[in-house]
Image (cartoon, rainbow, N blue to C red):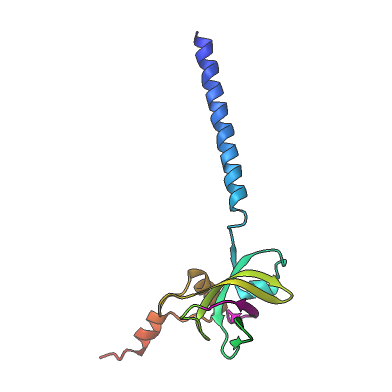
Amino acid sequence: MKGLKKKRRIQVIVLAAVALAASTAIIGYAMRDGINFFRSPSQVAEAPPGPAEVFRIGGLVEEGTLLRGQGETITFKVTDGGASIPVSYTGVLPDLFGEGEGMVGTGSYVDGVFRATEILARHDETYMPAEVIDALKEQGVYVDPDEAANAELPTN
């Protein structure tokens, strides 16, 4: 009787381990297309990804590069101060999207142009995604709005 309980316990543990491994594999397989890595324009310029790879790029919309073409196609360059990457997007842009503003786009890099399928802009006047801030700080371009505002205040 004692050997039967031990055998049953081992069977339950093995079955649980197999179920855990199978569920982890299924979750990983399901998420493979949903994980998009972030890259700054400098990283894309240094090591261009393949055209089949979907990733996120972020930075500031370069001044003077925002062009609205025929229909809904918009082209512009995104920069982090170290490199500029041309972006092409077909669709409606967010309301706060503009030159000199932070943005994050999802898409792929094909023939030297980032073909965006989604463009995200800040949702208020002070917000900028953490990835974009980190990329801009790395290039020495980022200025903290709070520090800039405090520097402008007169001291008594």
Q: Which residue lies furthest to the front in this view?
A: 71
Between 68 and 76, which is closer to the camera in this rendering? 68
89 part of magenta stretch: yes
Res 44 quadrant in image: bottom right
Q: Residue furthest top?
A: 1
What residue is rendered at 48% in x and 71% in y? 129
What residue is rendered at 56% in x and 34% in y? 19
Res 116 quadrant in image: bottom right
Q: Which residue lies furthest to the right in this view?
A: 111
Residue 75 in the image: above or below residue 12: below
The number of discs equals: 0
Question: In which quadrant is the C terminus drawn?
Answer: bottom left
Residue 84 appears at what percent x and percent y?
A: 64, 81
Q: Is residue 75 visible?
A: no
Residue 59 appears at what percent x and percent y?
A: 55, 77
What residue is rendered at 59% in x and 32% in y? 18
Residue 119 appears at what percent x and percent y?
A: 55, 73
Which span of residues is magenta-colored? Answer: 78-93
Residue 2 in the image: above or below residue 70: above
What residue is rendered at 50% in x and 74% in y? 133
Residue 123 in the image: above or below residue 30: below
Q: Is residue 55 visible?
A: yes
55 part of magenta stretch: no
Residue 85 appears at what percent x and percent y?
A: 65, 79
Between 127 and 107, which is closer to the camera in this rendering? 107
